Image: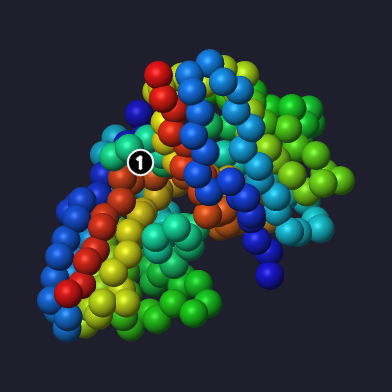
């Protein structure tokens, strides 16, 4: 149980275009999902917390107008990279917290397999 | 700023060798500590976690980790690795009980040869 999927698994796009990445909880409902970003040989960095039916909470330094997050249902959150540039090339990973679990380390997060974005 | 350090970036072992991966964090308060594993082509999975109590934590697949508060460390160990342990290992911390914000280390790539 507690499976999270991401689509696509990899995407190549031209500079200036927008790319949408989906994160789905397959066998549970998730009121809260998280988006991480990982540069090569660097750690995963939390970008934003996505809450179903409300605005996402972005970490300091993350441009909310560039990384649009929509959490329209209890099983789907999307991250749209708008006007992508080569420096946005990275590995984007989502995770989800099971609905009803309290915030914090006890409940835990379940991770998706990640999406590799390459901007040419 | 709070950070997590994993000093071993790439570890190569033969099967049956013992493993110890280092993890240090920089934060003086109470922490919750995690080790995640990412097998090739798969998602991050939780290996083990420490909140409180016995500082020696046992996880899945024969892994264990020891929290040494005085050293700000949470090293991962396994007495005898297998080829199937080949993966990327990430140490992470959460700084309080009311947040999900995981602070990750840079990861250690483990390769185990038969």
Check disc 1 and report the residue beneath it: B43
Image point (64%, 55%), residue name: B4
Q: How is the image coloured?
A: rainbow
Please state if B97 lies on the left or on the right of B40 as rendered.
right
Q: Quadrant of the N terminus of chain A?
A: top left
Query: x%, y% of residue B46?
Result: 50, 35
Outermost residue on the right side: it is B70
Query: x%, y% of residue A71?
Result: 31, 62
Residue B62 falls in which quadrant of the image? top right
Residue A69 falls in which quadrant of the image? bottom left
Query: x%, y% of residue B87?
Result: 42, 36
Q: Is residue B100 visible?
A: no
Mark 1 falls on what kind of element? Answer: loop
Residue B27 falls in which quadrant of the image? bottom right
Q: Is residue B48 visible?
A: yes
Image point (69%, 27%), residue name: B57
Q: From this view, report whether residue A86 is shown above or below residue B94.
A: below
């Amino acid at each position: 149980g507690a499976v999270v999927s991401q689509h696509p698994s990899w995407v190549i796009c031209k500079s200036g275009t927008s790319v949408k990445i989906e994160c789905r909880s397959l066998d549970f409902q998730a009121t809260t999902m998280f988006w991480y970003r990982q540069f090569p040989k660097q750690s995963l960095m939390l970008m934003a917390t996505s809450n179903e039916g409300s605005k996402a909470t972005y970490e300091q330094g993350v441009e909310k107008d560039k990384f649009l997050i929509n959490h329209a249902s209890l099983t789907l959150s999307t991250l749209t990279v708008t006007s992508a540039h080569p420096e946005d090339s990275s590995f984007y990973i989502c995770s989800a917290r099971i609905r009803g679990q309290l915030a914090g380390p006890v409940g835990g997060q379940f991770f998706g397999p990640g999406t590799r974005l390459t901007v040419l | 700023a709070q950070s997590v350090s994993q000093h071993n970036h790439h570890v190569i072992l033969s099967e049956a060798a013992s493993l110890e991966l280092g993890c240090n964090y920089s934060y003086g308060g109470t922490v919750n500590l995690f080790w995640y594993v990412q097998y090739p082509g798969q998602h991050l999975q939780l290996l083990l976690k420490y909140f409180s109590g016995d500082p020696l934590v046992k996880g899945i697949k024969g892994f264990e980790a020891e929290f040494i508060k005085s050293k700000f460390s949470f090293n991962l160990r396994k007495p005898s690795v297998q080829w199937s342990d080949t993966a990327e290992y990430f140490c992470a911390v959460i700084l309080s009980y009311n947040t999900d914000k995981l602070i990750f280390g840079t990861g250690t790539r483990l390769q185990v040869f038969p």
